[in-house]
Amino acid sequence: MVEHIMKFIKDLQIKDDSIDTSNDNELSHHHHVPSVLGDLDWNDITDMIRNMDSHTGMSDNARQEAQQHKQTILSIQSNLAKEKRIMRASYKGYSFHTYSAKRFQRKASNYMKTTGIYKMINEVDRTNPEVSQQCLSNIIKDVEMTLNTLLGSKFITDPQYLLMLPQQRSTIRLNYLHFVPDTRKDHKPLQPIIICKNGPTWNLTLYLSNMLWSMFNQITGCRKFSSGDDIVYTLEQYVKDGYLLRTTQFGTFNINEITLTFSHEMAIKALETFLDLYGSQLQTTTEGLINETILQLVRLVLRNQFFIYENKLYQQVYGSASGSLMTIPLVYIYLFFGQSSSLVQTLMNKKKEVFGRYRDEFILTWNNWTGKHQLLSNGFIINQQHPKISSLPISIGTTIRLLDLELGHNHNGCLLTKIYRVTKTDGFEIPNKFDYGTSEPSTLLKLALRHAVQCCSHEENFLGERVRIELSHLVHGFSADFIDKCIAEFYNEFGIKNNRDHRNKNIPYDILRRKILDNYEQQLILMEEQKQQQRQQNTIRVLYPSDWDAQVPINIKNDFINILKSCSTNQNVFDNMKFEFVPRPQTPLPINDYLVDKRPPLCLLTLPNDA
């Protein structure tokens, strides 16, 4: 059965070097590229598949299961090639969809031509990669020269310089683009996905992202949600504190369209306005950087948005790359400070209300709602400045839908939350947000149940979601015994005795949900304590491959610190910094990476060997 077949991944021990725990939920799964693929072209993936059952140390059972998995993948590949179709995962979901390769390509080409946000620079191909290699070299030089000048003029410090500097040249990759379908919408428009990890400006955008978010959050009181569970927990606290009233309105909006099409000039102007207004309050947050230096670094990123797509070199001249960590915080500043800060002033005076975001989705609560008109006004003005930006879609009412949630309250002011499913797009899709294929199926099924309990305020909604979870696993080949066992274990973990015939037994749902919410609160407290300890220790975590000998990271750590001190203009700057070298988590390669060809030839993304 499926639950047994999937266990072979434990023996593969494929390592994923792309895990970044500090920004792990800022980008979608479409933007993550396992490092095991870092030096491979698409043709090499087939060899990896063919060899997946021949790894050293595999048990006979694991090898047999890997052979079945391999044959399944190769069969899917063969059928797709024979029918001239391609497979893509949906933009906001995890289900796979197949399309005519020709029609999908035509749709993508039309997007490139009609949006006007990309400028074609030159054609490239694997026999003549000099154009893209020169472009990559120019970006690196631009970044290095700018940082060197700022360091020499003492506008940035040694640690800031090291944090923003591009990584080793052998590992730098030029950005590249691919498309995925947004199956939530009727005509299934394509969504551009630009891969920026390992790009020449990646470290710079990481630094700027953290700074911009800190500034924006400090001024507006905005909080970052880590998941739908986090949103529901926050609303439960909102109710507990007595802030939810019969007149309370919920609001939500998505800024994805603006991230792709905003004017660089107007975004810089909005950022400048923001810094001028609040710079005196942000001196600690900006870590000593003056306003002009921040603006200069943001301009540096925006003018170097080059990428490869379909054997062509492009530059993004509007908006910012979807895979850049700087994109969303810059757009929020653009939206809220582009013309008027009246909305922000109103938010700052509404300390009791919920105001937060998950990636490009915003949620607000409001009593005596007036913010709608202020937000719409700013969105309308931005639309007038750049007509390619559609009007900001804002959903407001006593009930809204956000992520996979439906949030609202009844006429008595009682909070109502539940899982929301779009039948035509979700179907019996396994809740893959928990990374099916990279963890134990039993653990993931229980995570899905926990998510359902936490997000469903009423038992009948949870029971409906539990049935959907069970059916989804049955449809995908998991046995009924396996599902029953996981559900029984789930209840037992919270001290609720439940026999195998749990479907016919009344479950003390309120007790179960209270325990799960309390457990979630304890996890939040523990995480905050760990973050506080890291801040006090000024610790920088460096991940290394877990199969290294124990002495290797120790030697590298000592050499690394000596190099940093020798390059620094201040010998004491690293005395209070702690470098923690820890083994990198191991995860298997997701099925998506075996079946979806989305990256250009490696020679178009890298520097020449003699660079």
Image (spheres, rainbow, N blue to C red):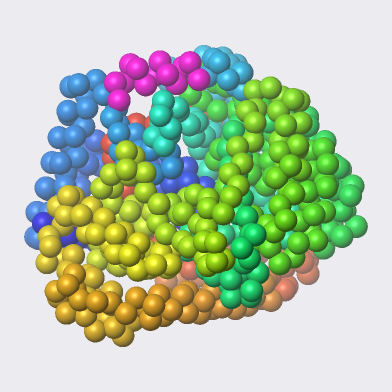
Q: What residue lies at 63% left-to-right and 55% top-to-bottom? A: 249
| x then y, percent, for residue 406 | 46, 54
The C terminus, quarter of image: top right
Placement of the N terminus among the 4 image quadrants: bottom left
Query: Would you say 608 lies left or right of 48 here?
Result: right
- Answer above or below: position of 487 versus 370: below
- Image vertical order of residue 312 relative to residue 355, above or below: above
Q: Quick check: 291 left or right of 246? A: right
Rendered residue at 90%/47% (across/down): 276
| Image quarter of residue 510 | bottom left
* Left/right of residue 95 with respect to residue 154 in the rendered view: left
Residue under the point 75% across and 37% down = 378
Please report the bounds of the magenta region as a residue range.
Answer: 99-111
Q: Nearer the viewer, residue 532 or 513?
A: 513
Q: Is residue 304 above or below residue 27?
A: above
User: Hey, which quadrant is residue 524 in on the image?
Assistant: bottom right
